[in-house]
Amino acid sequence: MNKKMKLVSVAAAMAMAASMSVSAFAAAPPANSTVGGAVPTDNGTEVWAGVAVDNPDMRIKVTVPTLFAFVVNGSVDATEGAKAVTAANGGLLLPNVKVENVQGGGGAGSTYDLTTTGDSALTFDNYSTYYSSDDSDYRGLAVKLSGSIKNETGSSWTHIATKPSETATQDLKKYRLSVNNQQFTAMNEDGSFGMATPIDLKAPENVANGSNLDDTTKLAKVPTSVEAKFGVEVGGTRGDYQTAENSAKVGTIVWKVSTQRTVPDGP
């Protein structure tokens, strides 16, 4: 029997509902949903995007967090201000972070509260399945995720491919992301910075026996999940960040979801 390779790729971003011409979720994506969209949550800085693609042989649905955030906890103290910006010394707060109750207009000498919710990790869920013509049944489908980030026009923060200097003031507000211990260092054609190695999401389990298969959508009812470590390297010292405005960064990660498998040729 002849074989052919089939590759499906979709991008998830905040504007996904428009770019993919699909309806946005009205609430958190239910397990039996067959549409994609960006879904704001009440959990601070996170926005979840659900990708769902119907195909004669495959049903692809993945949920990914599209927003990231971090706050540099600056210091006017001479000793603390000379230190590098790291999570270990309290100089860097990772997701989810909010800057609240700013007093003094946000300039030098202002006071504010830093609120954190959740751990510094991102969660990805895979509900995907494919139809096996060999035994007329559905199977769980593994997928790969590859993230990229592009510097926004007008932003005072700049993502760079190299490690920013932890002591040099000239690297103020320069940063480098990592997810799943993969740094965003690969340069893409559109000028964005991507992960060199994708994240593997295993196929949902117990799909073939029907116990984890939605009868209507043919998607898995219970996904496989990956909790990936989120990291940030920031240039400059703690003393270089003394205002709330200059210390917080929120950005968007675009995720490419792809899968590749062998299917039989048609007649």
Image (cartoon, helix red, strand yellow):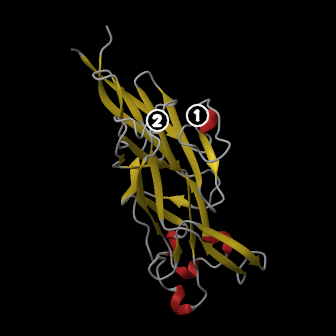
Which one is nearer the viewer's eye here, 208 or 119?
208
Of badges 2 and 1, the one in the foreground is 2
The answer to whether 162 appears left or right of 54 in the picture is: left
Give the residue type at disc 1.
Val
Quarter in which the C terminus is drawn:
top left
Residue at (55% x, 50% y) in the render:
66
Q: Position of residue 37 (x, y in %)?
A: 61, 40
Task: Name the element at disc 2.
Answer: loop
**For this view, does 78 lie left or right of residue 220?**
right
Disc 2 residue type (three-letter):
Leu
- Neighbor class of circle 2 (other Cα within 10 Å; few <14, some 14-19, many 20+) is many
> Which residue is at a point 33% across and 32% down the rendered structure image?
260
Query: Going from the N terminus, do you reach mark 2 or mark 1 first?
Result: 1
Q: What residue is at 38 percent from the left and 49 percent from the top?
A: 186
Question: Which residue bears the numbered disc 1?
Answer: 35
- Residue 12 at what x, y percent from top left? 53, 41
Between 225 and 46, the one nearer to me in the picture? 225
Viewport quadrant of the N terminus:
top left
Where is 233 relative to 11, above or below?
A: below
The answer to whether 137 is drawn above or below residue 126 in the figure is: above
- Disc number at residue 51? none
Q: Residues within 10 Å of mark 1 (few under 14, many from 20)?
A: some
Q: Residue 236's x, y, as percent?
A: 50, 74
- In this orientation, which residue lies closer to the viewer: 186 or 218? 218
Residue 219, disc: 2
> How much space separates mark 2 and mark 1, taking CA atoms?
12 Å
Secondary structure type for disc 1: loop
Q: Residue furthest top?
A: 267
Image coordinates of residue 244 in percent, x first then y, are 67, 74
